[in-house]
Amino acid sequence: MSAHEMGGVESPADVPHGRHDEHYQPVFVGARRAELDELLTRYPTKMAALLPALWMVQQDRGWVSEEAMVEVARALDLTPAYVKGVVTFYTMYHQHPVGKYFIQVCTTSPCQVCGAEEVVDAFLRHTGCEELGVTSPDDKFTVIEVECLGACGFATPVMINEDFIESVTPEGVPDLIARYK
């Protein structure tokens, strides 16, 4: 029985489904490992530090690969399956490479009434992304719809990476995109 089948992890080579990247470079080495170790002192258990540890990976790599999930599992004494379950549950973690600027447009009912679909279309048109979830040819932009950004009174809200922008209109999209080029 392999370490993976027993719930343990030996190395990133233990990635399921043959998706192993032989060129994977660990995130938690040197200063980044020291940062993780310091982070762990702020939580009652290693498991409690899972979300911030995943965020560290995404900050470094731009997304959380299968190998990174295994690395996080090892660092926190968790199973890769548990870590993957968390990554796939939360939409804030990218499971594939995305553009330098990750654009999230709220398309829930209040925003739809205020023209969210037109805002989405404007972002797709002005970024060069041909469809939702696809990265632009220059690798700068990825546009997705999200359920709620919690600003229904300021429709249509948009997040570009960690920047929160309220009251976006289709007409304002070109100027907004210009800020990120």
Image (tube, rainbow, N blue to C red):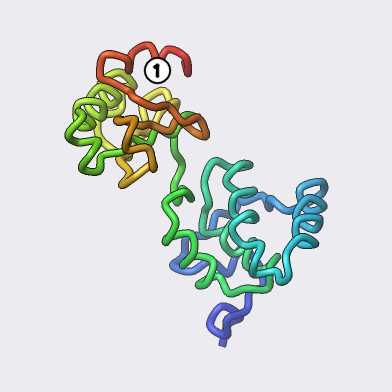
Left or right, 25 with respect to 108, comes to right
Q: Residue 59 sits in which quadrant?
A: top right
Give x and y (percent) for residue 163.
50, 29
Q: Nearer the viewer, residue 4 or 165?
A: 165
Q: Residue 72 sits in which quadrant?
A: bottom right
Give x and y (percent) for residue 97.
46, 42
Residue reaching furthest to the front: 153
At x 66% / y 62%, what residue is drawn? Answer: 49
Residue reaching furthest to the left: 113
Left or right, 175 with respect to 67, comes to left
At x 26% / y 39%, what residue is drawn? Answer: 107
Residue reaching furthest to the bottom: 1
Residue designated by label 1: 177
User: Is residue 72 visible in this depiction of the protein?
Assistant: yes
Which amino acid type corresponds to the residue marked 1 in the rendered image? Ile
| Element at label 1 | helix
Q: Residue 134 sits in which quadrant?
A: top left
3 w.r.t. 38: above or below:
below
124 w.r.t. 94: above or below:
above
Q: Nearer the viewer, residue 12 or 8?
A: 8
